Image (cartoon, helix red, strand yellow):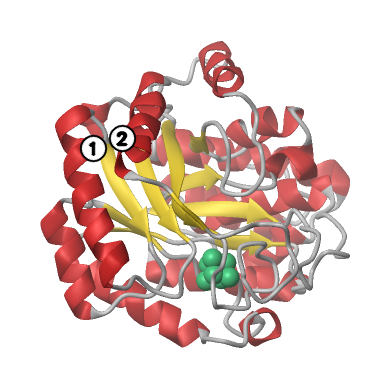
């Protein structure tokens, strides 16, 4: 039985380990409010759930930005919005550079390569670049191609499937009730509609968000439940790295103990999902955080650089996985 003073919580968590069915909202909230001395028990339970329902493999992914900066949307946490004074200029990558990035990603042992663009949704130019880029990557590199291009129409969903894009990332970012506080140029429901179409198309759904936007603990639990309802294949969990020039520049970084509570809570809510450490882990948890996360329910990492900030060197993460005896998920296992 997990080692919590609250017997109801201990029994709810034991059920998750046993059955692979996620916690309800009340129990998620209890995890997010655990006293400091019970955080190790939560991480230990989350680790057991991950090992039992996902296994020891870790999915390693690389991301590349096809179009950086100059986005017309106003997501208050994002330095790629063209509406703020954040120092990220609009830059496009060409196809040879895209293929080179895919090669470098594959060389780290990664099986996933996600092409990202800072846009509200793709226009004809971006879709045509994607068509050329995905074809060139598939000819040159043995890696799965994912995409993150904002909100899609049904035609665009169909086109991406036809190109061979196997997974689509579109984050709900935060709880539905909090979303209007941080984005005013589109709605949470619009994002959800894209996710619905992606799911129905057969592409894998990758959907997560950012903690530390100013949401309450209750809204963190609400968000975990909303993700559980969507049941994505993968959930990238970001912690806000407040960027200069954005409206959230002065937000405080998530307390490392709250970040660990959240990692455990999201794993216990989403027992079978690929839970990925994405941006902000270094600033929130420091170098040790990667180890704590991987022993607390995380089973995917991004190697190398994030979209607008520098990450740890890829070799540091790969070495850590070897030390923890967690094999990098093989490409064939994801097909
Ligand atoms: S989060 Fe995406 S949609 Fe929002 S401003 Fe940044 S790039 Fe644009």
* Whole-percent x, y for residue 197 in the image: 25, 75
Residue at 78% x, 45% y: name it: 284
| Disc 1 residue: CB within 8 Å of ligand 1 | no
Q: Helix or strand or loop: what does disc 2 sit on?
A: helix
Q: Are marks 2 and 1 in contact (CB under 8 Å)?
A: yes
Residue at 63% x, 61% y: name it: 210
Q: Which residue is labeled 1 in the image?
A: 137
Q: How far apart, in angstroms, are the residues tagged by discs 2 and 1? A: 5 Å
* Whole-percent x, y for residue 124 in the image: 26, 71
Give the vertical position of 177 relative to 48 (above or below). Answer: below
On the image, which quarter does residue 30 sit in? bottom right
* Whole-percent x, y for residue 75 in the image: 63, 74
Give the vertical position of 92 relative to 195 (above or below). Answer: above
Q: Which residue is labeled 2 in the image?
A: 99
* Near-viewer residue (189 or 100): 100
Mark 2 Cα within 10 Å, few/some/many (few <14, many 20+)?
many
Whichever of callouts 2 and 1 sits on the residue coming sooner in the sequence is 2
* Near-viewer residue (302 or 18): 302
Mark 1 Cα within 10 Å, few/some/many (few <14, many 20+)?
many
Quadrant of the frame with the C terminus: top left
Residue at 41% x, 69% y: name it: 150
Q: Does residue 148 show up?
A: yes
Quadrant of the frame with the N terminus: top right
On the image, which quarter does residue 184 sit in? bottom right
Q: Does residue 20 show up?
A: no
> How many discs appear?
2
* Near-viewer residue (9 or 149): 149
Horizontally, is 167 left or right of 309 in the view? left
């Amino acid at each position: 039985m997990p080692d919590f003073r609250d017997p109801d919580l201990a029994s709810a968590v034991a059920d998750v380990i046993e059955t692979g069915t996620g916690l309800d909202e009340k129990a998620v909230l209890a995890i997010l409010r655990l006293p400091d001395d019970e955080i190790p028990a939560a991480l230990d339970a989350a680790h057991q759930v991950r090992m039992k329902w996902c296994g020891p493999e870790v999915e390693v992914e690389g991301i590349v930005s096809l179009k950086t900066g100059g986005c017309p949307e106003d997501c208050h946490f994002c330095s790629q919005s063209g509406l703020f004074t954040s120092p990220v200029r609009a830059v496009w990558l060409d196809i040879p550079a895209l293929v080179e990035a895919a090669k470098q990603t594959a060389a780290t042992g990664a099986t996933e390569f996600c092409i990202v663009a800072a846009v509200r949704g793709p226009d004809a130019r971006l879709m045509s670049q994607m068509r050329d880029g995905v074809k060139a990557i598939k000819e040159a590199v043995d890696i799965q191609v994912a995409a993150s291009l904002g909100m899609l129409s049904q035609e665009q969903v169909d086109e991406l499937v036809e190109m061979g894009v196997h997974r689509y990332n579109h984050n709900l970012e935060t709880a539905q009730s909090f979303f209007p506080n941080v984005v005013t140029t589109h709605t949470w429901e619009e994002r959800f509609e894209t996710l619905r179409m992606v799911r129905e198309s057969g592409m894998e759904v990758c959907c997560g968000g950012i903690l530390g936007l100013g949401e309450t603990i209750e809204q963190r639990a609400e968000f975990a439940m909303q993700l559980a309802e969507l049941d994505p294949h993968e959930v990238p969990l970001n912690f806000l790295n407040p960027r200069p020039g954005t409206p959230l520049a002065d937000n405080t970084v998530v307390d490392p103990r709250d970040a660990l509570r959240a990692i455990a809570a999201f794993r216990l809510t989403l027992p079978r999902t690929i839970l990925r450490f994405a941006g902000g882990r270094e600033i929130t948890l420091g170098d040790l955080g990667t180890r704590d996360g991987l022993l607390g329910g995380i089973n995917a990492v991004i190697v190398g650089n994030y979209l607008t900030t520098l990450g740890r060197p890829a070799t540091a993460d790969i070495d850590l996985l070897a030390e923890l005896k967690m094999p990098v998920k093989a490409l064939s296992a994801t097909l």
